[in-house]
Every structure is written in structure tokens, then in C-alpha cells.
Image (cartoon, grey):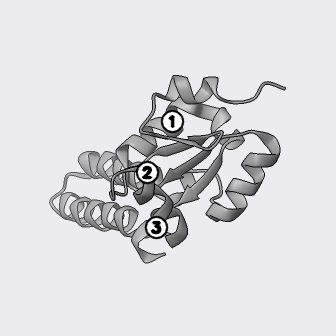
Amino acid sequence: MTRSWSTPTLFLLCGSVLTAALWSGGGVGAAAPVLLLSVLFAGLHSPLFFPRSTGVAQARRRSAADGRPVVFWRPGCPYCLRLRARLGRDARLLHWVDIWRDPEGAAAVRAVADGNETVPTVVVAGRAHVNPDPAWVRAQLPRA
């Protein structure tokens, strides 16, 4: 669990140090944007930006029942951020598995990605797709 918060914590610490240095040097106008950007980047790289993760077993059961894809991801991954941002509100319709919190999920990704933990890996109807285009993922969502 600590690894998932290490990147956002690093953004906040570095931003705070830089903000304090700018503030003490009299650059109040430059300190505020630095602080805001560091908070923004920390939020985007945190698990809070993504829908609630489940375990791989639960995600597979739910996917079998409702036909929605399973997305394996990890915090700090720029490709996962891209997928999440491009899906917008539709991201909540997918089943998300954080491979840093679920070792079984990490093993599932390694099994389909030549031993690497390449994310995002999207499983649709039992078939894995490594780093697919967000538009393609959106097209895989079942229509109501």
C-alpha cells in the first residue's frame, strides 16, 4: 500500500519545499502556482483519481456477470492516467484492479505481458489487451 502513495507524497514534499524556498525569497506570486501544481499532480497520481479498486477474483466475477471489462492499473502510471482521463465518467463502469495492492492481479498481468507488469492491461471477454486505445476501451462497454 505504501508504494501507491509514494509518488503523490513525493510531489507534495517537493512542491512544499520549493514553495517554502520561493516564499522565503519573497516570491509569493510564484509560490502559489507551484503549490497548486504540486497538489494537482499529487492528486492525479494518487489512487483517489481512479475508481475504487477491487481484487482480481472479485473483478473477474463481476465482469463475467455484467460483461464489463477489467482494467489492471497502478498509481503513477502515465498510460493509466491517460486511459482514466480519456474515459471520463465512463471509467466508473469498468472494474479496476490496482496491481500494487493485489499480488494476484500483478501475477495476472505478468502472465499476459511476457513477464512484465505492463499496465494498463484491459481484459475483455477473457482476452487481455495491453495498453489499448481509450476509444477502443470505451467501445467495449456494454450498452444499456
Residue 48 in view: yes
Query: Where does the image place residue 89, in percent across and percent down from the top left?
Result: 66, 34
Q: Amino acid at mark 2?
A: Val
Identify the residue shown where x is 75% and y is 29%.
Answer: 142
Count of labels in the image: 3
Numbered tag placed on residue 112 in the rendering: 2
Distance between mark 2 and mark 3 Cα atoms: 17 Å
| Residue holding disc 1 | 85
Q: Provide the secondary structure element on which disc 2 rests.
A: helix
Q: Quadrant of the C terminus?
A: top right
Identify the residue shown where x is 57% and y is 30%.
Answer: 137
Residue 75 in view: no
Q: Amino acid at mark 3?
A: Trp
Q: Provide the secondary structure element on which disc 1 rests.
A: helix
Identify the residue shown where x is 52% and y is 40%.
Answer: 84
Q: Residues within 10 Å of mark 3 (few under 14, many from 20)?
A: some
Q: Nearer the viewer, residue 33 or 135?
A: 135
In the displayed structure image, the side of residue 79 where residue 122 appears, left or right: right
Numbered tag placed on residue 100 in the rendering: 3
Query: Where does the image place residue 49, in percent across and percent down from the top left?
Result: 54, 50
Q: Residues within 10 Å of mark 2 (few under 14, many from 20)?
A: some
Q: Amino acid at mark 1?
A: Ala
Distance between mark 2 and mark 1 Cα atoms: 24 Å
Query: Where does the image place residue 52, in percent across and percent down from the top left?
Result: 65, 57
Query: Where does the image place residue 126, in percent across and percent down from the top left?
Result: 62, 44
Q: Earlier in the sequence, mark 2 or mark 1?
A: 1
Q: Quadrant of residue 93?
A: top right
Numbered tag placed on residue 30 in the rendering: none
